[in-house]
Amino acid sequence: MAIRTLDDDFRRQNLLRATFQHLRSLFAGLTREERLVLVVVALLHGVGLGWGLPSSDSWDNDGVAPRDFLPGLLKTFTQGDYYTYPPLQLLLLALLTLPVTLFALARAGSLSQEAVVRSFLDPHVMTAFTVAARAMSFVQSMGIVLVMGELAALIAKDRRARVYGMALAGLEVTLTYYAHTTNLDVPYLFWATLALLAFARAKEGDAPKGLRRAAIFAAFAVATKDQAYALFMFSIPPLAVAWLWQRRTRARELVRELAVAVLLTFGVVLLIDGAFYNPRGFVARLRFLLGPASQDFAQYAKTLRGAAAAFADVWRSFPVHYPAVFALLFTAGVLIAIWPRRDAEGRRRDAAVALLPALGALSFTLGFNCWARRVEERFEMPQMVLMSVYGAVALAALERWARGRSRPARVAFGLLCSVALLLALRQSAAVVAVMLDDPRYQVEDFLAAKLASGDGVEVYGRNVYLPRFAAGTHVWRVGPDEVGRRNPMPGIVEVEAPYGAIAQRKPRFVVVGAGFAWRYRIGRWDGDAGRVQPVSHSGNLTDTDATAFFQSLFAGTAGYREVLHARREGRVFPTIELHASLGMQVYVFERDR
C-alpha cells in the first residue's frame, strides 16, 4: 500500500509550503468515494459560516476574531504584557487579513485612537475579519479530516480505512461546530494531528530524521493553543521507548534524533511564544495559565477522586460527539488495530503505531482534563477525533470480512454502515441547523416588529450573548463593571449601574440570553463524588444585586413580564447547545403597563 509521505517535500521546501503541498497531494490522490466524503464534510463544515453576520462582533464565544487577534499580537510583542493565547494563529490571521487592516487604517483618516477604533469597529471591517478567520478554521478542519484518513489507512494497513477515517472525523459534532468559528481549538488540533501522523510515519518507516518535522508540527500546535502539550505528554514517550527497544542494537541515531526533536520542539515554542523577545510577558502568561486561566474554572476537586470523576466524565460524554453505538465500533477498532496482521506487501502492523491515537486520547485526558480539572465539549474533541481512527479500522475490517462472504452479507454490511453514518451525519448536521435557526434571529425579528419610536431596550453581558440591533434602536447595556473595560458595540450605550435599579431606567424591553443569565440562577451546590462548583461560578453568586435581580426577572416580580422565549425546537435535527452560545435560549421581557 503506497501512501504519500512528506519526505520529498521537506528536502527542498520550507515547512509551511511543504505542508500545503502535501495536503494538496492528498486531495489529488483521493478516490471518487473519498472525494464524495470530502464534499459532504465540506458542506457540513462550510454551510453556516455566516452565522450571526454581518456584525461588528461575532457569536463565537472565546473566538479570536474579529476583535482579539490584532490586539493579542500587540500584547505578545509588548514588553511585560501578554495575551491569553500563543501567537501563531494570530500571526497567520494578521497576514491573511492584512489588506483589510490597511484599508481600515487608510479609511480612519487619522491615527488617533478614536478614529482608528471607529474605523475598525465598522461592521464591514469586523465581518471581513470574522469571515477570514472562520474560513481558515474551515480549511484547517478539512486538513484534520484528510490527516485522520491517512492515519487510519496507515494503522489498518488498508486503503479502504481512509474513506471511513475521513467520514468519521468529519462527522464529529464539536469539530463541526468549531470549524465554523474563530476559536483556536480546530487550528491547534490541525497541527497536532499532523504531528501525530508524522511521528507515526517516522516510527513505521524506521526513519528517525522524520522526528524533526513531527517536532515542529507539535511545536506549532502548542504555539497555537497551550493545551496541545497534553496530546503528546503521555503518547510520544511510550512510542519512543518501543522504538528504542526495537533499535536497541543500533539506537545511537534514534537517541540523537529524539534529543534534536525535544530541543527543536521547545526552541520553536519558546521562539514563537515570546520567551526570547518578551521574557517578562512570557513568564506573566505562564503564571496566568497556571492560575486563574484554569483553576478558577476547575469543575473537580484537586484529589484523586476528582481526577477519577473528570476521567469518567470525558468518556461518559461520548454520545454528545457521536451516536452511542459508535462506542462499540471504536472499542472493536482498538482491538483489531493491535491484532497482528500483514498488508498486501507483507508488512506487519506496528502495535506501537496502532496505539498512538488511543495514547494521544488518553494523554489529553490525563494531561489536561484531569490536571486542569475541566471537562467541556471542546476539551473532549481531541479524544473523540483521534478515537474515530479506530472506527475506521473496524469498518474497513468489517467490509473486508463481508467481501469474502455471500452477497447478503455484503448488502447487510452496506445497509448497517450507511445507517450508522447517517445517524452521525444527522447529529452533526444539527449544529448547522441550529446555526441557521439561532434563537437570536427570532429576537431580532420580534424587536423589528414591536419596537416603536422612543422605546428603550436594556441588555446585559458580553457581545457574544446579544442579538444584532437595527441602526437607530435605542439600546443600552447595564452592568456593575467599569464601562472602560467593556468591549464596545456600535449603537449600544454603556451604563455602569446596578442591575436592580431597572425601575430608574424604565426600558420597554429587556433582552437577556440564557448563556449569560445562568450564572446568577444556578444557585450554590456542594461538591459530589469529586465534582465541585467552580470558583468563578460561586464568585458570581456573591453579587447579591445581580442574583436577586435575575431571580426576580425570571420569576416575573421585577415589574417585567416575559413576552418572548426564543428557542429552537427541531424534530429532524435535535437542538444542540455548545459553548454557551450555540442554540442558547434568549428571553425578551416587556415592562408591565
Image: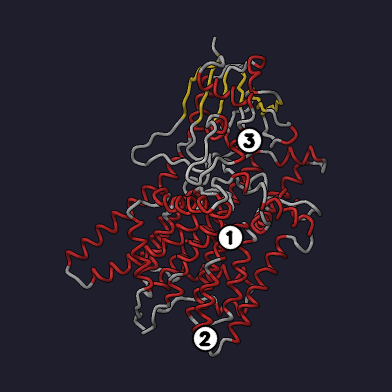
Q: Could you say where residue 586 lies in the image, as x and y percent from the top left?
A: 51, 30
Q: Is residue 560 left or right of residue 420?
A: right
Disc marking residue 539? 3
Image quadrant where one finds the N terminus: bottom left
Q: Residue at x 48, y 29 (%)?
A: 442
Q: Could you say where residue 366 lies in the image, as x and y percent from the top left?
A: 52, 59
Give the number of the mark in front: 2 or 1: 2
Identify which amino acid the numbered label 3 is placed on: Gly
Identify which amino acid the numbered label 2 is placed on: Arg
Q: Residue at x 65, y 69 (%)?
A: 265
Q: Nearer the viewer, residue 292 or 131?
A: 292
Work out whether mark 2 precedes mark 3 in sequence or the reverse, and give the earlier one: 2
Q: Does residue 538 sit above or below 498 in this rendering? A: below
Identify the residue under disc 1.
228
Q: Is residue 344 left or right of residue 256?
A: left
Image quadrant where one finds the C terminus: top right
Q: Nearer the viewer, residue 88 or 297?
A: 297
Q: Does residue 102 sit above or below 196 in this rendering? A: above
Disc tally is 3
Name the secondary structure under disc 1.
helix
Residue 32, can we see it? no
Disc marking residue 247? 2
Density class for disc 3 (Cα within 10 Å; few <14, some 14-19, many ≥20) is few
Query: Which image quadrant for residue 114?
Result: top right
Name the secondary structure under disc 3.
helix
Q: Nearer the viewer, residue 494 or 502?
A: 502
Q: Residue at x 64, y 78 (%)?
A: 259
Work out whether mark 3 precedes mark 1 in sequence or the reverse, and give the earlier one: 1
Q: Could you say where residue 521 lies in the image, as x and y percent from the top left?
A: 54, 29
The reply to whether discs 3 and 1 touch (Cβ–Cβ < 8 Å) is no
